[in-house]
């Protein structure tokens, strides 16, 4: 019976569905696109295929671009060097009109984006000669009626900006012509400052106009071209929330070429202020990413939806790859117009020889040195030499389009020289040069030609192949020969790609195109026609704007802080709850606490970037010594350095804890040792001891056991320079075996640390020499197996360096080529993971620091932090102050361990968690300090508060009952309430211009003795 019920329910559902479908009324037919097949050449019998995804795409575009009647109109500001208008002064008044459709101006064609819900504005200079200052106001008013806002550059600045820097420097460089090579410019170096300053000043003029035009902070701003690469950063300073996009229409050169620019970093920083950057092809994106990586040490990542992204200054910058489309429907319709038909008849009459119409080969070029138009003429000459019989049946039409390049006359002279050579040898009628034809005549040549050659050297934006395809019909299409270095080469199929520098290659392509059968030409045409008609200018523009909206959402939650000075000023995006460290708010919590655990990274946190030597200054040691004098304070240096080095630097501060090799070894503070030694001894394996157990305050064993191993002599570091030579950081000495690995000793080294406790001098008075280990000696057994592999990679990577530690190995490739070093690190990581059994080691590549680190399984600063808390929890008197400060990616695990510690009760209000990163960068920390100097200043203030709390006056206040409690002279101390003095804040607000506030870590704070965030204000105590 069950199956009968199932069948009955199915029939009912089908009947109901049919009825509802019928009531819905007739459905509109989906749009169609003509698809031609090789077997059917009749245009009337072409195959029609429904492409429903185009309909869906259009609806999505309209929805995302705000075509909703209920929404407020959005604004889009298009910024280009020139406005897409024509201006003329008639009497005392100015006349302004848009560039006509025949001008083939992409920026004028973007008027297709205008709608009731999208207001489009244009910003740019006025085409033509300089406008007198007296006429600028009247012209500006007239232009604003067309939603055009002019930028008036002073005449001298405009010349240096456009001709000096844009066309004289960037344009040739982006097309792989070094600026010094243009006309043997020996004054490039001496002229650089004046043209660069003009470029900067010109971009400032543009940014001021853009800022004035944008009435809302979150408008869309779309910047075009290489002329305005600094505008994004200049606008971002004034409009931090603006949605800024940049499309680079030109080719982007390889990093080796771009790096020759003196202002290379300035240009990249200007571009990276965008939310979205667009390029024509992936080749250009690949070169751009290489420049960013080599010059700014930034790596790319994959974003949701298949985009590529770069994180810079706390912001996410998306990369879009999509070639610009053309007005395909316009050219398709215009090719059938009467004007074009008339021009076609005139051309056919002129090319008919001996009663037979000749085969037309058309070539359309701008006279530009970077395009190389003379090379295709040389290739045509080579073709005629190999096929002299073709001279009677062919006619080569060389179309010259107007150009603004300074070398256009010289390039034209080269072309005319080649034309004369061909005509002298094969007849005067073989080539015809057409200079600046009308659009109707150009499209007529498109329709009549059987072969088109568009083979330029480098060309980012060249829409002639698209126009050629859209103008032709299926009845008699032509073959299309294009350069493989053009931007559209990757987009178009059904074309013949050639290397334009090889005239033999181009000549062979001409022969193949001329001899191509009608079926082959029609088949190729069908393949590219479908793409050209579908990927229009409107589709490209809407796609970019939709991606710009999505990309800006990644940064919408950020607040921006201005850093730097003068021309180096930039905005850094920070989390809304990421505040500068404010000691006026941290200090009271510090004073209220009965126990304070302070974890400090060393390199990059307590000292600067120079990590060679990195000896701590005496002032820093004095600060740490004062902090450690208070028995409530448990201070640890959390470092990846060896215990020998840390003991040499800080061993004399006996109440300072040292965690070497990220926690493999620990030297406990002297006043903690009695408690540590009282813990039960564990017989478990090290990996089991490192497992965190939640004991809820019960005494437990320590994961660290007393180490009986001697502190080894430091290994000698061998670094290979870029020249391949080995440079020893220490003088040559004898080689000895230490713990199964080869290390180098030197007679110039100081005496090694003696015994298990170490110390350069036995009678130096240091009593706290005991080191405890988190790892067992057998966890080093992998090193003899791994070291030969690491040495092999090291020898093959110039600029890399191996540092052999007791339990770990670090391979540093910061001095190597960025790409090659990273590739070698990834390959070494894979090889070692296959070579060594799972569960033994962790192999981590830190791309930001350019190191590969190998440590025993599970060992990192996050684990060490959790184990420290777990070990000390039962002896820490509440409320507890927990603080961690670090600067790199490995310290993020330390922050996470404090903020999400499995050994702390998140609902308990007895723990105050403070995490602080050094430098303005994306971080999980609550606060940031600008540099190590600010960290040291903040620690000095905590040390001063410690000294003051332990002063005789504070003791008298406590005895009188005015101090709010009592304090024991040893141990962790009893609860006290000390108001303290009003010390000046050492926060980063002086540098950032804002003061950050302190709120307790969510889930770990919020009780008595703490601060609460309420409505943006802080209330406490």
Image (cartoon, grey):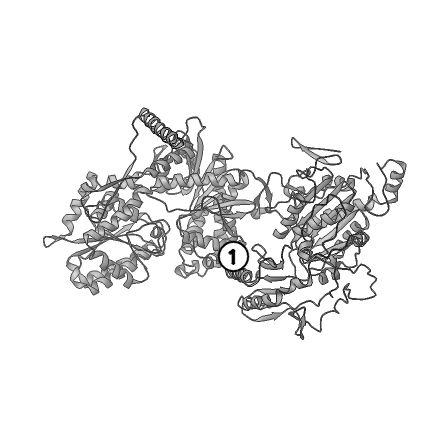
Residue 588 in sight in this render: yes
Q: Residues within 10 Å of mark 1 (few under 14, many from 20)?
A: some
The quarter of the picture where the C terminus appears is top right
Looking at the rendering, which quadrant does residue 70 occupy? top left
> Position of 728 compared to 41: left or right?
right
x and y, in percent, of residue 468 in the image? 26, 47
Q: Residue furthest left?
A: 355
Looking at the rendering, which quadrant does residue 577 occupy? top right
| Residue shown at 45% from the left, 55% from the top | 287
x and y, in percent, of residue 858 in the image? 63, 54
x and y, in percent, of residue 834 in the image? 53, 61
Looking at the rendering, which quadrant does residue 663 occupy? bottom right
Q: Residue furthest top?
A: 23
Q: How many callouts does the rendering have?
A: 1
> Position of 68 compared to 442: left or right?
right
| In-front residue for pair 50/294 | 50
> Position of 81 compared to 840: left or right?
left
Give the secondary structure at mark 1.
helix
Q: Which residue is mark 1?
A: 294
| In-front residue for pair 691/464 | 691
Compared with residue 762, is residue 634 higher up or lower down, i.e. above or below? above
Q: Residue furthest bottom?
A: 734
Residue 98 in sight in this render: no
x and y, in percent, of residue 323 in the image? 37, 47
The quarter of the picture where the N terminus appears is top left
């Amino acid at each position: 019976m069950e199956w009968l019920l199932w069948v009955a329910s199915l029939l009912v559902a089908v009947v109901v569905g049919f009825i509802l479908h019928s009531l819905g009324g007739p459905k509109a037919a989906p749009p169609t696109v003509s698809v031609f097949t090789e077997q059917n050449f009749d245009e009337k019998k072409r195959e029609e295929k429904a492409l429903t995804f185009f309909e869906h795409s259009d609806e999505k575009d309209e929805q995302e671009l705000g075509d909703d009647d209920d929404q407020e109109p959005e604004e889009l500001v298009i910024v280009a060097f020139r406005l897409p208008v024509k201006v003329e002064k008639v009497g005392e008044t100015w006349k302004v009109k848009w560039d006509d459709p025949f001008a083939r101006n992409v920026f004028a064609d973007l008027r297709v984006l205008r709608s009731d819900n999208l207001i489009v504005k244009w910003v740019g200079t006025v085409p033509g000669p300089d406008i007198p200052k007296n006429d600028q106001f009247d012209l500006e008013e007239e232009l604003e009626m067309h939603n055009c806002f002019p930028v008036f550059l002073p005449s001298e600045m405009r010349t240096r900006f456009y001709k000096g820097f844009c066309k004289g420097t960037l344009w040739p460089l982006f097309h792989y012509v070094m600026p010094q090579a243009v006309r043997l410019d020996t004054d490039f170096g001496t002229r650089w400052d004046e043209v660069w300053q003009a470029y900067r000043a010109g971009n400032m003029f543009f940014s001021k106009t853009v800022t004035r035009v944008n009435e809302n902070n979150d408008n869309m701003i779309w910047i075009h071209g290489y002329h305005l690469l600094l505008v994004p950063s200049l606008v971002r300073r004034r409009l931090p929330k603006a949605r800024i996009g940049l499309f680079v229409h030109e080719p982007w050169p390889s990093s080796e070429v771009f790096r020759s620019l003196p202002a290379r970093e300035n240009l990249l920083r200007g571009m990276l202020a965008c939310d979205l950057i667009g390029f024509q092809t992936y080749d250009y994106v690949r070169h751009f990413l290489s420049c960013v990586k080599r010059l700014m040490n930034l790596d790319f990542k994959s974003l949701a939806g298949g985009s590529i992204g770069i994180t810079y200054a706390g912001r996410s910058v998306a990369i879009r790859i999509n070639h610009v489309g053309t007005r395909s429907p316009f050219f398709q319709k215009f090719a059938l117009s009467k004007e074009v038909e008339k021009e076609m008849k005139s051309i056919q009459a002129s090319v008919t020889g001996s009663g037979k119409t000749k085969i037309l080969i058309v070539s359309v070029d701008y006279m530009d040195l970077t395009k190389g138009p003379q090379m295709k003429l040389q290739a045509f000459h080579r073709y005629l030499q190999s096929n002299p019989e073709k001279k009677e049946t062919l006619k080569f039409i060389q179309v010259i389009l107007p150009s603004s390049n300074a070398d256009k006359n010289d390039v034209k002279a080269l072309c005319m020289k080649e034309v004369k050579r061909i005509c002298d040898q094969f007849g005067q009628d073989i080539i015809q040069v057409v200079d600046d034809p009308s659009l109707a005549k150009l499209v007529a040549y498109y329709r009549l030609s059987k072969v088109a050659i568009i083979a330029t050297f480098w060309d980012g934006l060249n829409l002639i192949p698209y126009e050629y395809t859209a103008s032709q019909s299926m009845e008699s299409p032509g073959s299309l020969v294009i350069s493989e270095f053009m931007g559209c080469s990757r987009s178009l199929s059904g074309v013949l790609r050639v290397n334009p520098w090889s005239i033999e290659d181009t000549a062979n392509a001409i022969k193949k195109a001329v001899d191509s059968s009608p079926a082959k030409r029609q088949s190729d045409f069908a393949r590219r026609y479908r793409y050209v008609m579908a990927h229009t200018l409107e589709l490209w523009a809407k796609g970019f704007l939709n991606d710009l909206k999505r990309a800006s959402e990644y940064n919408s939650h950020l607040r921006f802080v201005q850093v730097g000075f003068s021309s180096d000023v930039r905005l850094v995006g920070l989390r809304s709850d990421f505040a500068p460290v404010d000691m006026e708010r941290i200090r009271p919590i510090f004073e209220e606490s009965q126990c304070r655990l302070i974890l400090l990274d060393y390199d990059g946190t307590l000292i600067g970037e120079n990590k060679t030597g990195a000896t701590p200054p005496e002032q820093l040691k004095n600060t740490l010594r004062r902090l450690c004098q208070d028995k409530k304070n448990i201070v640890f240096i959390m470092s990846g350095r060896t215990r020998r080095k840390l003991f040499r630097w800080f061993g004399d501060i006996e109440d300072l804890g040292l965690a070497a090799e990220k926690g493999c070894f620990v030297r406990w503070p002297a006043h903690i040792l009695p408690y540590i030694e009282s813990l039960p001894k564990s017989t478990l394996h090290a990996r089991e001891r490192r497992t965190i157990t939640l004991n809820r305050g019960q005494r437990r064993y320590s994961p660290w056991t007393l180490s009986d191993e001697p502190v080894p002599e430091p290994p000698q570091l061998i670094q290979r320079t870029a020249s391949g030579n080995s440079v020893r950081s220490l003088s040559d000495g004898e080689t000895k075996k230490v713990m199964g690995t080869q290390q180098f000793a030197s007679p110039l080294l100081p005496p090694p640390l003696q015994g298990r406790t170490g110390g350069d001098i036995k009678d130096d008075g240091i009593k706290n020499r005991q080191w405890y280990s988190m790892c067992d000696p057998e966890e080093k057994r992998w090193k003899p197996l791994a070291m030969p592999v690491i040495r092999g990679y090291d020898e093959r990577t110039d600029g890399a360096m191996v540092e052999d530690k007791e339990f770990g190995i670090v391979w540093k490739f910061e001095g190597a080529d960025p790409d090659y070093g990273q590739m070698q690190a990834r390959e070494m990581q894979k090889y070692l993971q296959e070579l060594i059994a799972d569960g033994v080691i962790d192999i981590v590549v830190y791309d930001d620091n350019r190191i590969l680190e190998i440590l025993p399984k599970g060992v990192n600063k996050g684990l060490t932090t959790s184990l420290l808390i777990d070990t000390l929890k039962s002896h820490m008197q509440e409320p507890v102050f927990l603080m961690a400060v670090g600067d790199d990616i490995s310290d993020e695990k330390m922050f996470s361990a404090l903020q999400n510690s499995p050994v702390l009760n998140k609902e308990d209000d007895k723990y105050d968690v403070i995490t602080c990163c050094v430098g303005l960068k994306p971080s999980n920390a609550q606060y940031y300090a600008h540099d190590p100097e600010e960290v040291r200043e903040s620690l000095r203030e905590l040390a001063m508060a410690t000294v003051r709390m332990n002063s005789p006056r504070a003791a008298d206040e406590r005895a009188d009952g005015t101090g709010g409690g009592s304090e024991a002279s040893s141990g962790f101390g009893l609860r006290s309430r000390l108001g303290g003095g009003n010390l000046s804040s050492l926060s980063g607000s002086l540098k950032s211009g804002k003061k950050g506030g302190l709120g307790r870590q969510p889930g770990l704070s919020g009780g008595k003795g703490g601060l609460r965030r309420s409505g943006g204000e802080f209330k406490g105590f």
